[in-house]
Amino acid sequence: MSDVAAIQNLVQKQHQLKSEIAKVIVGQDDVVNQIVLSVFAGGHALLIGVPGLAKTLMVNTIAQALGLQFKRIQFTPDLMPSDILGSEILDENRQFKFIKGPIFSNIILADEINRTPPKTQAALLEAMQERMVTVAGTSYKLDLPYFVLATQNPIEQEGTYPLPEAQLDRFMFAIKLNYPSFEEEVAVVKATTSTIKTTVNALFSADEIIEFQNVIRKLPVADNVIEYAVSLVSKTRPDNPLAPDFVKTYVDWGAGPRASQNLILAAKAQAALKGKFSPDIEDVQAVATGILRHRIVKNYKAEAEGISDETLIQKLF
């Protein structure tokens, strides 16, 4: 299939994908859109929201609709790295044998990732970056495509550990979930308190998704769009001469080069899903909030004055 035909096919299939997801998930279009972007751009996503907003259900539904293998890991304060990666045991022949952990799957739902100490959170780092796992000196490749979709409760809640910056940086998108509107909540209650069961059909195969990811990576990007993305990221760094005054006032730490890479990859996916063959500056702006939100560390002054990440990013445009 030619790249042009592949993009046209992708546009059609992503509409079907969103229709399948909408059978189960009411509203939350922006959230679903960012997760789909992250899947086709080959990134990971972090969903941030209070308990009870159907974060787990959403990831489960998306995994079913994508036709991928799915495993859920519930993160708890006593979870150990070996509970995620797997461990070596002695078999009946007194030989060491590796028993794979739940990380060996296409889609991992890391549920309430900030409920576990940093040592266990760090067990995901190699898998997220290198798509492989090393246990007792032996490396094991993970099946592709591979995504970590993590959920996180707001940090103020009891018994949570903040995610280290290095871990946060591995997520392409940080996606905020808000409460549903009144009409959406009515629809949710109607749908979930009856005996009607909804079936979600698998629309893709693993190979198809990898093929679409490769086509998206091949999309050409004009130099001015890349320069715009890099300059946007540079402006988030308070020690950069290009940084505007409000960044110097309210930001302790800005986004690193991985943010620039992710901006371009996500803009390519955004363009492809709209049927375009090259991303423009509007595509970069459309994905910027989700990509920069978790990479900008605000200072005490910003917290005290109630300045949100979204406000800072919008002002950068």
Image: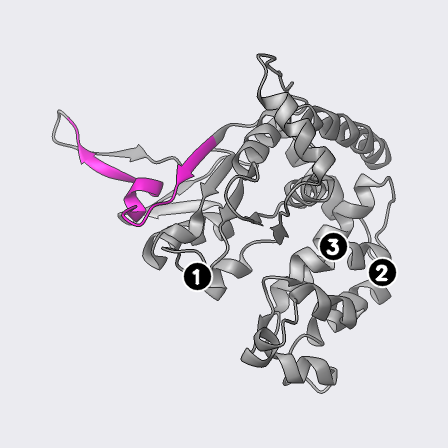
In the image, is residue 34 part of the stretch drawn in magenta? Answer: no
- 1 or 3: mark nearer the eye: 1
What residue type is disc 2 on?
A: Ile
Color theme of the render: one colour
Q: Secondary structure at mark 1?
A: loop
Which residue is located at x 84 percent, y 53 percent?
Answer: 279
Give the residue pinned by disc 2: 281
* Quarter of the rendering occupied by the C terminus: bottom right
Mark sitting on residue 287:
3
N-term mark: 2 or 3:
2
* Residue extent of the magenta highlight: 71-91
Decide which of tag 1 and tag 3 comes sooner along the chain.
Answer: 1
**Viewed as shown, does residue 162 lie left or right of 171?**
left
Question: Would residue 278 be seen by someone viewing this image from the given angle?
Answer: yes
The residue mark sitting in front, 2 or 3, is 3
| Percent of width and height locating residue 20 | 70, 24
Amino acid type shown at disc 3: Val
Q: Residues within 10 Å of mark 3 (few under 14, many from 20)?
A: many
Marks 2 and 3, how far apart in space?
10 Å
- Residue under the image location 63 percent in, 68 percent down: 257
**Crowd band around label 2 with a 10 angstrom C-alpha radius: few (<14), some (14–19), many (20+):** some
Tell me, for residue 99, which label it has, or none: none
